[in-house]
Image (cartoon, rainbow, N blue to C red):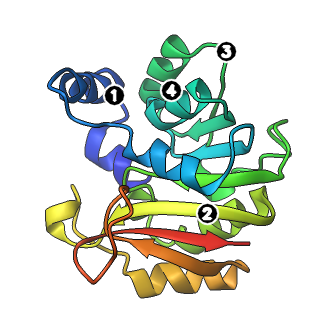
């Protein structure tokens, strides 16, 4: 069981969606992840939203011209995504053993995005396997973009993954760090409790 399921019991989809809908209604920007992704690859690019949750990032990218697939293990989150964007492809799978080709969506993605603390909420010990699997889903030159908290202030669980650990997993998977930001708005990273990392295959 991953840390997200331990935290939520796999029944939080509607609550999660409602929270972001409320933020949007109050005028807060809830599309920073999609906006950053759109600066990295052109419209029409293939995107894999890994740990897609309710589909917020992928749905926004689809609306501005991207082709994508979302994958998540939480059925309650995917139910919201399928309801809100039934024409997009949503797959239920554990990222630790997800094989896009076996799932019928192929590989060759231009960008894989893992937003929403995906890596720190994986089943402990599977981080390297997930990094390797997501790297394999990329075409040569493709990008893995992951943003996650590094301390208790930025995570709903005790921190267990450092940037050094994450970079080592990415290096072992054949990826090279190209950029690191402090936010999805691409503010420079100078240390701190949250980081958005861009690695290239």
Task: Answer with mark 2 or mark 4, whichever residue precedes in sequence.
Answer: 4
**Rendered position, 57 above or below 113:** above
User: Residue 144 — which label?
Assistant: 2
Specify which label sits upstream in the sequence, 2 or 3: 3
Q: Is residue 9 left or right of residue 59?
A: left
State the SS at label 3.
loop
Q: Would you name the residue on which mark 3 appears?
A: 87
Find disc 1 in the rendering and name its residue: 11
In the rendered image, residue 162, in percent from the top left (x then y), is placed at 37, 81
Residue carrying label 4: 78
Crowd class of label 1 (few under 14; some 14 to 19; many from 20; radius 10 Å): some
As drawn, the label of residue 153 is none
Q: Earlier in the sequence, mark 4 or mark 3?
A: 4
Which of 67/116 is in front? 67
Question: Which image quadrant: the C terminus?
Answer: bottom right
Residue lying at 20% horizontally and 62% vertically, measured from the top left = 154
Picture quarter containing residue 193?
Answer: bottom left
Residue closer to the observer: 106 or 201:
201
Q: Earlier along the polypeptide chain: callout 1 or callout 4?
A: 1
């Amino acid at each position: 069981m991953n840390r997200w399921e331990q935290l939520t019991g796999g029944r939080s989809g509607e609550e999660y969606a409602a929270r972001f809908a409320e933020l949007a209604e109050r005028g807060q920007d809830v599309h920073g992840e999609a906006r950053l992704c759109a600066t990295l690859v052109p419209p029409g690019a293939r995107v894999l939203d890994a740990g897609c949750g309710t589909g917020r990032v992928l749905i926004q990218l689809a609306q501005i011209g991207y082709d994508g697939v979302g994958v998540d293990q939480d059925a309650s989150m995917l139910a919201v995504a399928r309801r809100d964007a039934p024409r997009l492809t949503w797959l239920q799978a554990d990222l630790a053993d997800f094989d896009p080709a076996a799932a019928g969506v192929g590989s060759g993605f231009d960008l894989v995005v893992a937003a929403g603390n995906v890596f720190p909420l994986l089943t402990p010990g599977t981080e390297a396997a997930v990094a390797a699997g997501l790297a394999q889903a990329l075409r040569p030159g493709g990008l893995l973009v992951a943003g996650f908290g590094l301390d208790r202030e930025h995570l709903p669980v005790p921190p267990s993954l450092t940037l050094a650990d994450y970079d080592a997993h990415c290096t072992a998977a054949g990826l090279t760090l190209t950029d690191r930001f402090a936010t999805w708005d691409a503010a420079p990273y100078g240390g701190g409790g949250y980081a958005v990392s861009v690695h290239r295959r």
